[in-house]
Image (cartoon, coloured by chain):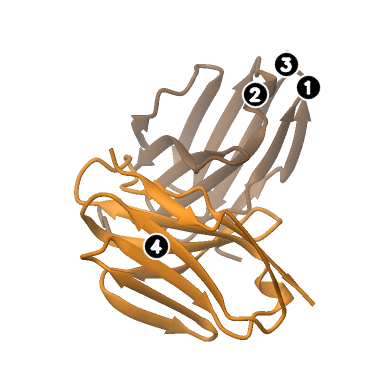
Chain colours: A brown, B orange
């Protein structure tokens, strides 16, 4: 248990569906991240939020839309995804501005796009 | 471009064996992380190193900054050590927005 909670843990969706992934932390962190983990590939950074402001969009397609309503919650809205988007999506948080700070990860949301 | 290479990619061993996982990188770094990912998916930080050696229980991590190399050792391995072990480095420059470059991971299976 790392203090970062992701829901749902598993999601199966069709290419025309709209769904959302949720991440929640109550660690007092103010930087939150979305990562994509595909088989046989390193973790890929998707989005970064610092103090609720998006500071990085790592060339992610617009079918992925992040939302950070406050420092404790982060969403990833999914729309018209492709089968190659099937992956494990991991949320992480840390203290912003502390470059050597430890990242705390959630358990991940396993997404399958049919 | 910073590359993080881990070896081996896959490792199967018997319970009780001494395990070594290696990580090499190509640029100057301020820190190196070893992470553990269990089959369920969640990632846990094991160590953060900038020099020397750290030990936690049966896990030992070493780093040689001059050779740009780190090793993770597991003594008296146990089936519950079965996981993917990921090396991540924090380059002085050129890292992602999170400051980290990740390796692909080493998939370890410890058989009873």
Q: CA distance from mark 3 to mark 2?
A: 11 Å
The chain that hosts pointer 4 is: B
Q: Is residue A24 left or right of residue B61?
A: right
- Return the residue at label 4: B33
Q: Is residue B34 visible?
A: yes
Q: Earlier in the sequence, mark 3 or mark 1?
A: 3
Q: Residues within 10 Å of mark 3 (few under 14, many from 20)?
A: some
Residue closest to the eye, A54 or A107: A107
Q: Is residue A64 above or below residue B71?
A: above
Secondary element under disc 4, as helix, strand or loop, is strand
Discs 4, 3 touching: Cβ within 8 Å? no
Q: Earlier in the sequence, mark 2 or mark 1?
A: 2
The chain that hosts pointer 1 is: A
- Return the residue at label 1: A114
Secondary element under disc 3, as helix, strand or loop, is loop
Q: Position of residue B65 (x, y in %)?
A: 24, 66
Q: CA distance from mark 2 to mark 1?
A: 10 Å
Discs 2, 4 touching: Cβ within 8 Å? no
Discs 3, 1 touching: Cβ within 8 Å? yes
Q: Residues within 10 Å of mark 4 (few under 14, many from 20)?
A: many
Name the residue: 54% across, 58% down: B8
Residue closest to the eye, A96 or B33: B33
Residue closest to the eye, B1 or A90: B1
- Return the residue at label 2: A84
């Amino acid at each position: 248990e790392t203090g970062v909670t992701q829901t749902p843990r598993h999601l199966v969706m069709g290419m025309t569906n709209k769904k959302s992934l949720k991440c929640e932390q109550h660690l007092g962190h103010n930087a939150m991240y979305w990562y994509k983990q595909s088989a046989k590939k390193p973790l890929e950074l998707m989005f970064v939020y610092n103090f609720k402001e998006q500071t990085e969009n790592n060339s992610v397609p617009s079918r992925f839309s992040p939302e950070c309503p406050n420092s404790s919650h982060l969403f990833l809205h999914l729309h018209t995804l492709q089968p190659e988007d099937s992956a494990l999506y991991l949320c992480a948080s840390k203290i912003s501005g502390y470059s050597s700070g430890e990242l705390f990860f959630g358990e991940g949301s396993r997404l399958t796009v049919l | 471009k910073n590359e993080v290479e881990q070896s081996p990619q896959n490792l199967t061993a018997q319970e009780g064996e001494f395990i070594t996982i290696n990580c090499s990188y190509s640029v100057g770094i301020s820190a190196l992380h070893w992470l553990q990912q269990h089959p369920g998916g969640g990632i846990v930080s094991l160590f953060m190193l900038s020099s020397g050696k750290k030990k936690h229980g049966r896990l030992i991590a070493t780093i040689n900054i001059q050779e740009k190399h780190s090793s993770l050792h597991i003594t008296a391995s146990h089936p519950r050590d079965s996981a993917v072990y990921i090396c991540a480095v924090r380059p002085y420059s050129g890292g992602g927005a999170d400051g980290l470059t990740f390796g692909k991971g080493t998939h370890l299976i410890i058989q009873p």
